[in-house]
Each structure stands twice: as structure tokens, then as C-alpha cells.
Amino acid sequence: VLRNFGWLDADEVPILITLGPKGSRWSARADWLLMVLCRRLSFPGRMEETCKTVGGSCTYVSQAWNFVLDFIFKKYRFMMSNIKRYAPWFAEMAAWLWERGCPHDNLVGFADGTDQFVCRSIGPKGGKRFNIYQRSNYSAKKKRHALVWQDVLLVNGLNSIWGPYAGRHHDAGIVDHTGLLDDLADVSKDLGVDYAVFGDAAYPLTRHCFPACKAPKGCKLATPQKNYNLIMSRFRTPVENNFAAEGQQWGFIQHVQNQRLGRSAVGKQYIARAFLHNCYTLLYDSITSVQHGGFVSENPITLEWFMDASN
């Protein structure tokens, strides 16, 4: 069941092992809670299928599932959106990309917006209670209802996320609302180097954000701009592959029929998936680092440090 971590590596996840609740209503083993979390997020399906695998009634397993989601959301939500905690590794990341042909010597990550597709919201008994969510969560670009997350994938393969935002919002507005560029400005002021992230053409051009070149309507890109986009595409491809691998490893969220706003913890599930994928990256090699040639830090980030929310 724990195909993403393996039973031997389960003991290397100290915080998750201490998840066992000791309330007055029920209790459970911590490794069993980890099994419920991984089994539920790994495969799309009904709760009855999870119960047959992990053992226990649907009520008991559902309580365990909701408890783990609440725990990760409360303890690690703000940690997952704190890019400042990786500032001690920014110099190594930028130097590593520069040595491999990146035209920027201060680039530390790649920003991108991710759509989490959800079901069309409906009210009870066909009412109009959730019609406001239908309008706000409808993405005109994707022609589907979705929640939007702002992701920044660092060179070491770890992912920082902000959100969720309604599907109608644009990436440029979301990145301004998250405060990502302000956090990079604070880190740059402390370290004395203007570190930045790279995004697609939808992102604004600032000291801390480099977008891809886009020709105005009716015009064509110049040759240097085409060459720039070609060079940066070699670095952006592993980023897209990392997002695809995350969806394949934790396929529950890809099953849109399970993503029902107002009836399930849709946002908490995405945060739990990103959190587990970062743990997987630290236990094993990141697909981004492997395709880029293997980023190796002199002082690598440990799983214990990552799961310490005080850092």
C-alpha cells in the first residue's frame, strides 16, 4: 500500500509517525494513519475500497482521513508557502543553474500556476446556493471549474505552494497577492543578491521575476528573444514533468469526481499531496534534479529539518 514510501522508509517520517490521536472518541496507530493517507491519495476510488485495504469500518477510516488532513493543514500550511526558509541554499541553487547554461546567475526556482479541477458546484436538492462558486471558480482559459494554486519549484525539487484561489483569477494577479516577490525582495536585501524566479509569459517582469518573452499582437519575436525562450525551455521542461509526476504518484486529486466543493476538503487534499511529495523528494531523488543533472548541496536539506515547522 505504501508504494510511494515503502514500509522500510515509513520510520523515517517522524512527524507523521506521531500523528496518533489520543482523544476520548477513538485512537489509532500512527503508522496506520500514514497508510490511510498514502492509500487514499495514491489511488482514485471510493472510501469502501480504502477500507478493504487498510482495514476498519468506513466511519473509522473516514475519521482518520479527516484527522490527518486537518493535522497537515494546521501544522504545515504556512510552512509550505514560506520560501524564505530555503534562503541559505539560494546561492548554491543559482550557481548550479548558471553552470549549466542558464542565462541568469540569480535564478533559484520556477513559478507556475496549477489548476485543480473540481466538480461544478450545486446546491442541495438542485438549489442555487452554490451558484456563486460556479461563476468564480470557472476558468475561461480551461473551460472548466477549477481552483488555482501558485507553485514555485526550487532547484532542489522542493515545491512551495500558495492558495487556493478561484479559477477565474489570472497568474499575474495571484503572484502579486501571494507576496512571493515581496518575500524574495526581503531575502535579497538580507543576502545582498537579487534572487528571482522564472515564469511563463503571464508573469510580470520585475527584479525578482523573469517571464518568458511574448510578442505583442500582430508582431513576431526577435531572434534573441526566441533563443532566450529556447534556452529557458530546457530548464522549464523538468518542472512540468515534476508536476506530472506528482499527479501520477498521488492520483486521487486527478479524479475530478472526488473533488466536490462544500462536500469534501478539496484544498486540504492538495496541501497534503504537496507535503507528501516534498517528503518523497527528500527520501528519494527529485525528477527535476535528475533531469537537470542532479543537484547536490554541500549541506543538504534533511527530512527532519523540513518537517520542523519552526524553521
Image (cartoon, rainbow, N blue to C red):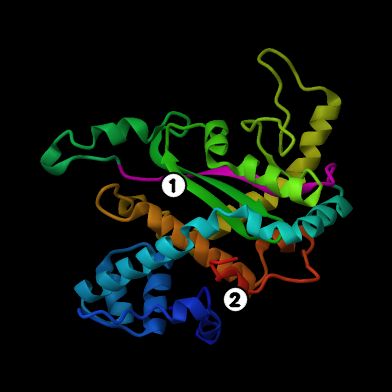
Question: Where residue 116 is drawn, which disc sits there?
Answer: 1
Tell me the residue that label 2 is attached to. Answer: 304
x, y percentage for residue 155? 72, 56
Query: Which disc is residue 84 wearing?
Result: none
* Residue 1 rendering spot, x and y as whole percentages: 43, 78
**Range covered by the magenta-colored residues:** 102-119
Q: Position of residue 272 (x, y in %)?
A: 45, 62
Q: Amino acid at mark 1?
A: Gln
Q: Position of residue 258 (x, y in %)?
A: 32, 55
| Residue 53 is one of the magenta-drawn residues | no
Total labels drawn: 2
Callout 2 secondary element: helix
* Residue sticking out furthest to the left: 125
Q: Residue furthest front?
A: 190
Q: Tell me which secondary structure the magenta stretch mostly adopts.
A: strand
Q: Quadrant of residue 122?
A: top left
Say left or right for 216 vs 81: right
Residue farthest along the top direction in this orientation: 218
Q: Amino acid at mark 2?
A: Glu
Crowdedness near tag 1: few (<14), some (14–19) or many (≥20) residues, C-alpha within 10 Å: many
| Residue at point 27%, 67% (across, down) | 47
Pick the quarter of the image with the C terminus.
Answer: bottom right
Name the residue: 46% across, 57% down. 271
Q: Quadrant of residue 215?
A: top right
Which residue shows up at 62% across the image and 67% down it?
Answer: 281
Q: Nearer the viewer, mark 2 or mark 1?
A: 2
Q: Residues within 10 Å of mark 2 (few under 14, many from 20)?
A: some
- State the residue at coordinates (81%, 46%): 193
**Marks 2 and 1, how far apart at CA:** 29 Å
